Image (cartoon, helix red, strand yellow):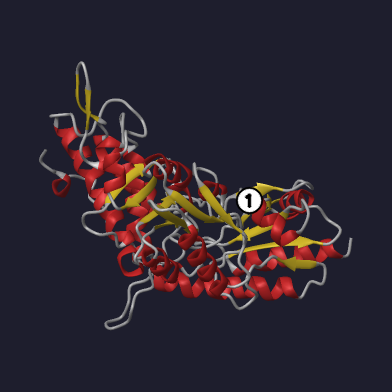
Amino acid sequence: MPTLLSRSPITHAPITHDETPAEGVRVRRIPRVIGADVPVPLRDGRRVPYANLDYAASAPCLEAVQDAVTRALPYYSSVHRGAGYASQVTTGAYEEARETVRSFLGAWRRSAVVFTRNTTDSMNLLAHAVPTGTSVVVFESEHHASLLPWRRAVRLPAPATPAEAITAADRALRSCPVGPRLLVVTAASNVTGELWPVEELARVAHRNGARIAVDAAQLVPHRPLDMTALGLDYAAFSGHKLYAPFGAGVLAGRADWLRAADPYLKGGGASASVGATTRWAPSAEQRHEAGSPNVLGAIALAAACEALTASFPDLAAREEALVGRLRAGLAAIPSVRELSLWGGRAPRVGIVSFTVDGWNARDVALTLSEEHGIGVRDGKFCAHPFVRHLAGGDAAAVRASIGIGTSEEHIDRLLGALAALAVR
């Protein structure tokens, strides 16, 4: 199928910079999100600009993503099976999006890049594809997307240190029965934001004849991920956390297990021929992307990958300043306790969870929303065993998470509101 993308209006527009630089001056490349200052009502009838501190649940759409989807819509058509111009343009855009994602993840050239709905869908696809008898090792500190899909799993307790995580994984993998083995681990915790030692864990997995699958959903909106450099066999993430909320996710990694498995969904596109018997498509992508794919979701995802790749150095420095301001402010409020697995100095992305003495988490979240126009998450964050481990008993927590649209004013508004709650 010819690719007409280079001649079509779907071609990604250049990133717009915040300013025109003088010669030799590096340009700051901070993308913009839609709805950063949308007004929201308060209980007393006033309206204030929304302080969105819930990026870890779902991030707002980047302007660059909206623009990419808008350019694609006039040419939207079927992919892979149409001869018309619009179908060829759309097919080209869809497959170029796959290559953009591959580059974004630093995946091997021969790796599979399968478009899914989200990280949960990606991990369930991998669980469907692992060979029969595969032993899976997973920590109880994982998000449910990584904790629950496996047929045969050894659950390890939350490790007290990164070194203990490495030692525990090594011991568990050595104890697995003969056969395929898989270590499943997060890159960045969706509860505490703490970064896991995935490169060291990958070495441990490979030393024990195992593969490693990484839940990168909370890492890739904040930091680059290079699968090849880190030695990762699989990585999964979601578009709705990557400023591309159009219903697409990704599973990328070694293709052999995916090619050998029956299709995750059976239908058009997954089949090479159908008659008295069915012969499935040979490539991992075709085999597991049955039906009409989410083309606009893939295009949106690729646009987000491009915008963030150009922005990561500036975004990381900005985020570190904001999360430092947030954590220092929380530490100054006596009734607030930050949840952490490895202590305050552990490297992390912009996610902070905490409890407030004398308040249940839902009441804190509702008060922040109704009285201050602040959006946070409350509950156990689809990580029930981990939150119970950190908070004790059946307690829930509050999570504040920052992103591209977060400002110092948002952080200060949250801290002021929590300080006021503490003395009620």
What residue sits 55% from the left and 72% below the top? 162
Residue 388 x/y as whole percent: 71, 55
Q: Is residue 93 left or right of residue 300?
A: left
Which element carries disc 1, helix, strand or loop? loop
Residue 277 visible in rendering: yes
Q: Is residue 341 left or right of residue 394?
A: left
Q: Quadrant of the N terminus?
A: top left
Q: Nearer the viewer, residue 109 or 332?
A: 109
- Amino acid carrying mark 1 in the image: Phe
Q: Nearer the viewer, residue 208 or 30?
A: 208
- Residue 142 position (above or below residue 418): above
Residue that carries the numbered disc 1 in the rendered image: 381
Q: Quadrant of the C terminus?
A: bottom right
Q: Nearer the viewer, residue 5 or 360?
A: 360
Residue 241 x/y as whole percent: 48, 52
What residue sits 17% from the left and 29% below the top? 82
Residue 318 x/y as whole percent: 50, 73
What residue sits 66% from the left and 52% below the top? 385
What residue sits 38% from the left and 59% below the top? 210
- Residue 171 position (above or below residue 143): below
Q: Residue furthest bottom?
A: 24
Q: Residue furthest right?
A: 424
